Amino acid sequence: MIRSLIPRLGLVVLGALLPSGGATASELPVAGLDHVVVVVADLEAAAARYRALGFALKPGRHHANGIRNLHAKFPDGTEIELLTVDEPGDDLARSYRRHLAEGDGPAYAGFYGPDLEVTAGHLTSVDWPLRRAGGLLTIDDPALGHVFFGRRNASPTDRPEHFAHANGASGLQAVWWAADDPSSDRLLDDLGARPVPVAWTSPSGAACRAARLPSGEVRLLPPAERVRPDRPICGLTVAVADLDAVLAALQGVVPVEQVRVEGDGRAVLVAPDAACGLWLEFRAVGGPGRPDRPETAGGR
């Protein structure tokens, strides 16, 4: 292990909250996060990178429209999807190709609607124009083209080994959203997301906000924090039980300058160059956390 060169990041308290007003999860328009789609030019290289970061990957399939994918799935139904396009065969595949022209990174972030009819009814009632395609719900607004709503993807082909992540990851806890349009705040308000009272700072030190869903959060960053200029989604936070498992997975894999350990010892942050175009934070939840120590993982 080698010394950390990076100062402390601001702390955000993560975790599930009970639905307000006595509503059950199925009655909420949005109950949490769904999954994030990360587009990559080289799926095999991205798979090798994420396996090296400690993720188990479930094989996807080659779709008729030219899309191929892999899934880092978690027991709560959230996931990170790695996706590429060979020869695009429809508008969806072509849209992914346009994203790929900008480089690897997250293209779309999903919210979990347990009942999409409830989700659609609520959004329509507050004047959001909607589209339906492929079992997903999207908002017909260019400023929110990176957002969708889904039911989470629990599959009969899921196996225990698909959730056996060497880094101890157990769920997607936060999406980092660098917004530059008032539509973002309006949507989160309409979804019932609550402001988080604890301030936090971005990797560059900028003051940021966060909004909490019944489970999981959206971290709100200034537009200047985007990894790719045209992509609002720029990072993810993954829950882990033990950061020592994360550090063990990263040791010898990620260069020291691309790994940060928080001063409170509760999170490890991997830079975009080492995580296929996004900030990837591993945060200890559900326990006392890892004792603070002035070390970080690194590599050759």
Image (cartoon, grey):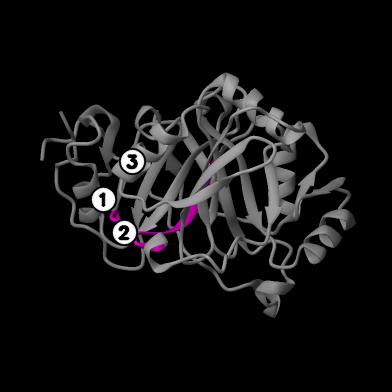
Asked whether residue 169 is drawn in magenta, I would say yes
Sequence-first disc among 2 and 1? 2
Residue drawn 54% across and 43% down? 69
Q: Tell me the kind of residue under disc 3.
A: Leu
Question: Quick one: SS at disc 1?
Answer: helix
Q: In the rendered view, would you say 300 is above or below 153?
A: above
Residue 268 or residue 81, whichever sits in front: 81
What element does badge 2 sit on?
A: loop
Q: Height in image: 93 above or below 242?
A: above
> Which residues make up the magenta segment?
163-176
Q: Position of residue 211 (x, y in %)?
A: 58, 51
Q: Within the magenta stretch, is there residue 195?
A: no
Residue type for callout 2? Gly
Residue at 67% across, 62% down? 151
Is any atom of residue 212 visible in this view? no
Quadrant housing the C terminus = top left
Which residue: 88% across, 54% down? 124
Image quadrant where residue 159 sits: bottom left
